Image (tube, rainbow, N blue to C red):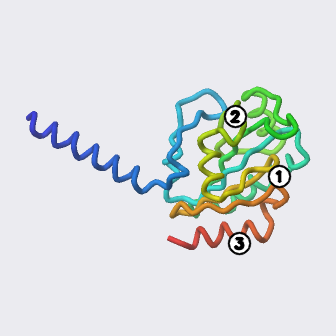
Amino acid sequence: MKYFRCLALLLSASLAAAAFAQTPAVLNHTMNPLLPGKLIALSQYAGKVVLIVNVASECGFTPQYEGLEALYKRYQSKGFVVLGVPANDFGGQEKGTNKQIAEFCKANFGVSFPMFEKIEVPIAQHPLFASLIKATNQPPKWNFHKYLVDRAGKVSAFPSTVEPLSPSLTKAVESALASK
């Protein structure tokens, strides 16, 4: 009986290692959800096309939440997800608590895509964003900077001025979704 338990543990560990190996490096992070809950492993999004956005509630780009939600709804069933990460780095435009941010996003834009807790360190020092910056050599210059991670882990960056439903971003999303 001990032999089978050891074999099961060994198999389980090797499956976990294989899954970790298939996860793009930029998704090998864990983060807290915006509202209190269990720590979320971003590796659960491996195999999907992921758009990671640093967001803020009091920014001139804040209306992009509407486009992000529309983009998420349009492509979600095809393996696409938007991940919102509030940050107060640029112009102090995210002063709210996590609860206030969640209420604002839901009430004003109907945000249903995953949101994570507000970053409390300079964005370039946050492990997720440090890996995105390393992958693209493009740090965010303002709120609503977008990083698109394809299924293979290749990362592209889009500045804040690129609207979520712009032809350049939707074309990039569709192209990434078409690649297996």
- Point out which mark residue 77 bears: none
Label 1, label 2: how far apart the Cα atoms are = 19 Å
- Point out which mark residue 64 bears: 1
**Where residue 69 sits in the image (x, y, percent)?**
74, 52
Q: Are marks 3 and 2 in contact (CB under 8 Å)?
A: no
Mark 1 crowdedness (10 Å alpha carbons): few <14, some 14-19, many ≥20 = many
Q: Quadrant of residue 94?
A: top right
Would you name the residue on which mark 2 appears? Answer: 119
Q: Is residue 163 left or right of residue 81?
A: right
**Where residue 125 sits in the image (x, y, percent)?**
66, 38
Q: Are marks 3 and 1 in contact (CB under 8 Å)?
A: no
Closer to us: 43 or 103: 43
- SS at mark 3 in the image: helix
- Point out which mark residue 171 bears: 3
Q: Amino acid at mark 2?
A: Ile
Q: Nearer the viewer, mark 1 or mark 2?
A: 2
Label 3, label 1: how far apart the Cα atoms are = 17 Å
